[in-house]
């Protein structure tokens, strides 16, 4: 019997993902709305886990490792509205087996699940190229973890002061990171940084 776990706090997403998984032959599709429910369900040993990043009470990426420990045989697909390459890289580093944008068509969801079932990893072609460039020393390879964090938040439309408040650091720290990003990425102004963040090229 094939089983899957969908971890997402949106009922419509649960419904859509469950239907696609059942079309792919999954006999049971369990649902979890938050991290605690996810870990409880994962103990049942699903074959596949579809995990949203944006969960109540924290970053869904922090759940990847605990889920992998709770269900070591499960293949984990991170599913997110934010398809920046940095998030995909973090997901794979945390132990996920694939990363898929929620904006992807249903056919791509099916392809991703089939790839995971076959023991492969899944990224969209654009993400795969961007990640290969990043890891081979291309644009963005020299960014520090703090700079990547600031860039991701700029891409979500946050001001420097908001970023400082959210991270619990001084405005000057964030401003310095922003200046370093502009220099390393060869752009001028916040609009340039936002464009790069949204395009997911680093």
Image (tube, rainbow, N blue to C red):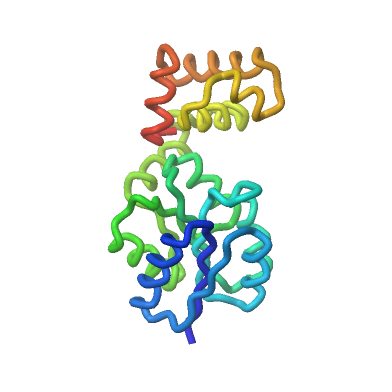
Exactly how many numbered labels are in the figure?
Answer: 0
Q: Position of residue 77 (x, y in %)?
A: 48, 60
Q: Position of residue 109 (x, y in %)?
A: 35, 62
Q: Where on the picture, by quarter, is residue 32?
A: bottom right
Query: Image point 58% across, 57% down: which residue?
Result: 95
- In the image, residue 168 sits, relative to residue 74, either above or below, namely above
Which part of the image, by quadrant, shows the C terminus?
A: top left
Q: Position of residue 96 (x, y in %)?
A: 54, 58
Horizontal relation, residue 116 to residue 7: left or right: left
Q: Position of residue 44 (x, y in %)?
A: 63, 78
Query: Image point 43% across, 28% down: which residue?
Result: 139
Horizontal relation, residue 35 to residue 131: left or right: right
Q: Nearer the viewer, residue 29 or 74?
A: 29
Q: Nearer the viewer, residue 161 or 87?
A: 161
- In the image, residue 43 sits, relative to residue 147, either above or below, namely below
Query: Image point 40% across, 27% down: which residue?
Result: 196
Query: Image point 46% across, 55% down: which residue?
Result: 79
- In the image, residue 62 sits, relative to residue 32, either above or below, namely above
Q: Residue furthest bottom?
A: 1
């Amino acid at each position: 019997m094939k089983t899957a776990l969908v971890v997402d706090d949106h009922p419509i997403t649960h419904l859509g993902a469950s239907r696609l998984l059942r079309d792919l032959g999954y006999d049971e599709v369990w649902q979890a709305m938050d991290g605690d429910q996810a870990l409880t369900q994962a103990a049942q040993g699903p074959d596949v886990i579809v995990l949203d990043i944006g969960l109540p009470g924290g970053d869904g990426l922090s759940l990847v490792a605990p889920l992998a420990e709770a269900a070591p045989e499960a293949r984990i697909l991170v599913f997110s509205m934010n398809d920046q390459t940095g998030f995909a890289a973090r997901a794979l580093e945390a132990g996920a087996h694939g990363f898929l944008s929620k904006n992807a068509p249903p056919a791509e969801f099916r392809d991703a699940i089939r790839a995971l079932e076959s023991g492969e990893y899944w990224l969209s072609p654009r993400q795969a190229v961007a990640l290969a460039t990043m890891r081979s020393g291309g644009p963005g390879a020299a960014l520090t973890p703090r700079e990547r964090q600031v860039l991701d938040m700029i891409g979500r439309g946050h001001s420097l002061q908001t970023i400082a408040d959210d991270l619990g650091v001084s405005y000057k720290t964030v401003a310095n990171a922003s200046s370093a990003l502009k220099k390393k990425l060869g752009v001028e102004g916040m609009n340039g940084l936002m464009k790069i963040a949204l395009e997911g090229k680093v």
